[in-house]
Amino acid sequence: MNDKHYILVAFLDWGLGHATRCMPIIDTLLAKQYAVILAGNGKSLQFMQQQYPNLKTYELPDYNIQYDANKHAAWQILWQSTKIYDAINKEYECVKNIVAQENIQTIISDNRYGVHHEKCKNIFVSHQIAIQAPKPFKFVEPFLLNRLLKLIHKFDELWIPDIEEIEISLTGKLSHNFSTKISKKYIGILSRFTKNIHSSYYDDEKFDVVAIISGVEPQRTHFEATLLEKLKQTNKKCLLICGRVENEMTKIVDDNVTIINFLHSDALMYYLQQAKVIVCRSGYSTIMDLVALNKKAILIPTPGQTEQEYLAKMLSEKKMTIMQTQDKIDLVLALQQTESIQGFSNVYTKDLSKEISLH
């Protein structure tokens, strides 16, 4: 008789961040001898299949959000809300089949609202509950919070990857100051780069600045082109990691900038540990990686993504990071300003094995 406890871990395909922050959860579950099955889609699923080649995977429906780089991201998501709800319904139907086939007992869903089942214990993972609306439309935020909580209340527990004390939290009002009908737990920082763990990868070449490209198209490609030109102006030795999973390890040198399409976690961790400053988007998973690595950073939020804009502004006001907008990038100035910030040295992390309980 098979007495294994089967857990389905599902993650949203929105860049690689939702997938990478699930990695410490998956590693903890595997260490506790649970049987883990993965579910997702797109590049994030491809990435996780590379990271966990021995785990069974299922493909879920694509949310298929389309972006125009010249339009406000928040409104583009709102206009496509019907498409999102359709995807939620479709992934719910997919999960029914997975649960039946694999005898799933627990589901852990990172921002996939349709991944739950009445026969399972359902856990929802998210750092962004209180969605931030564009400035002229702040009055709709209570409505958005209410709508989101209705979806979350279909789960049994809410796990928030942050610290409960708002004074030192990384998410601020995105995940604080609201009540839920289900159990709410702050499980600490989730990063594939654990503090005080050093990479086994080694390279003679070291870089002053490491820049990471992430996020969805078309802004990802636009950001890459802009950042390459700005890195050249610094005259520092720079590494630009483009985040193209499909073109792994292709390497080009352009003036003072070395360009690599994609790095696996161990090699990426090595270059980030060696760097003096990291330049990146202000996606929350990236921020948690910066905390684990205890690195100073220049954050450049994706234009129109209110969550990233809020996080970058809040962390810069706390003197943890430097913030610049994409239309006014000046890395020479920003690198000078990093001398006066404290970074993430005051942010503590938790022992995830003690925080994760499925009973």
Image (tube, rainbow, N blue to C red):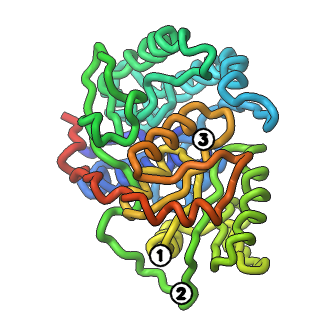
Q: CA distance from mark 3 to mark 2?
A: 31 Å
Q: Residues within 10 Å of mark 1 (few under 14, many from 20)?
A: some
Identified at 45% across, 62% down, the residue is 296
Q: Residues within 10 Å of mark 3 (few under 14, many from 20)?
A: many
Q: CA distance from mark 1 to mark 3?
A: 25 Å
Q: Which image quarter holds the C terminus?
A: top left
Q: Disc 2 residue type?
A: Asp
Badge 3 or badge 2: first in the primary sequence: 3
Q: Nearer the viewer, residue 145 or 96?
A: 145
Compared to 185, does 52 lie above or below? Answer: below
**SS of the residue at dot 2?**
loop
Badge 1 or badge 3: first in the primary sequence: 3
Q: CA distance from mark 1 to mark 2?
A: 8 Å
Q: Which mark is residue 13?
A: 3
Identified at 37% across, 58% down, the residue is 342
Q: Which mark is residue 203?
A: 2
**SS of the residue at dot 3?**
loop
Q: Nearer the viewer, residue 153 or 291?
A: 291
Mark 1 lies on residue: 270
Residue 20 visible somewhere in the drawing: no
Identified at 29% across, 13% down, the residue is 181
**SS of the residue at dot 1?**
helix
Q: Nearer the viewer, residue 26 or 137?
A: 137
